[in-house]
Amino acid sequence: MIIQSKNFILRPVRRGDEVSIVKNINNKKISKNTATIPYPYTMEDAKGWIREKINQYKNKNSSDIVWGIEIDGEICGAIGLHEIVPGHKGELGYWIGEKFWGRGIMTEATKLVCNYGFKKLKLKRIWAKVYVFNTGSKRVLEKSGFALEGICRKEAKKGNKYIDAYLLAKIK
């Protein structure tokens, strides 16, 4: 389940990745742009998340597949397919540390994961939702061949605020 790029490695997360995960994910901007990443993000959060992913890796029937994005031995982000319906569809989700933004890493990772989903998992549809203010993430999806399907009104609630999200999909 390792996917090699010339710029990074997509690999399962493992114990020992906690420090680099916390270093790269503990950011208000990342939390603001994602549904489930808290801020501050603690070492306990990282340990719990890694434990959850390790259990999913062991479960061959898991509906989630997640890769850490490794650059120079450090996990700088993560990308995965969630809610996978075998032979049909899955939801793409990702994050990457702010110091890695604007380098094309997530666009390349998205293309690799979509290729895996379409070829290995025989998916016909990969979809993602991004908050309407997250223009960088929307652009990653567009550059990766996703098409805008619509806007989901009040899709998320963060604090006392409701947030609209774009729905984008890539079809095979």
Image: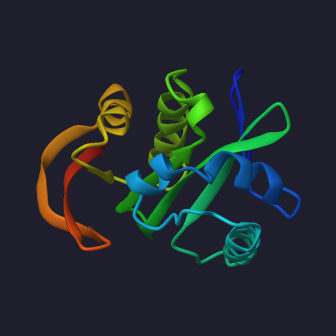
Task: Count the marks.
Answer: 0
Q: Is residue 149 above or below residue 31?
A: above
- Residue 1 appears in view: no
* 80 to the left or right of 60: left
Residue at the spot x=50%, y=56% of the render? 121
- Foreground pick, 140 / 172: 140
Residue 52 image position (x, y, % from top left): 68, 76
Left or right of 64 on screen, residue 160: left
The residue lying at 47 percent from left, 56 percent from top is: 31
Please say if 129 is above or below 51. Answer: above
Instruction: In this rendered view, identify the residue nearer to me: 119 or 47.
Output: 47
**Farthest residue, direction right:** 16
Residue 59 percent location from the top left of the image:
68, 78
Q: Quadrant of residue 144?
A: top left
Q: Quadrant of residue 161?
A: bottom left
Viewer-proximal residue, 15 or 36?
36
Q: Quadrant of the C terminus?
A: top left
Residue at point 78% right, 49% down?
20
Please provide percent x and percent y for residue 127: 31, 53
Q: Is residue 164 visible?
A: yes
- Relative to 74, 3 lies left or right: left
| Coordinates of residue 164 in the picture (x, y in percent) | 17, 57
Q: Residue at x 51, y 73 (%)?
A: 63
Front in this rendered view, residue 73 or 42 = 42
Q: Is residue 116 left or right of residue 133?
A: right
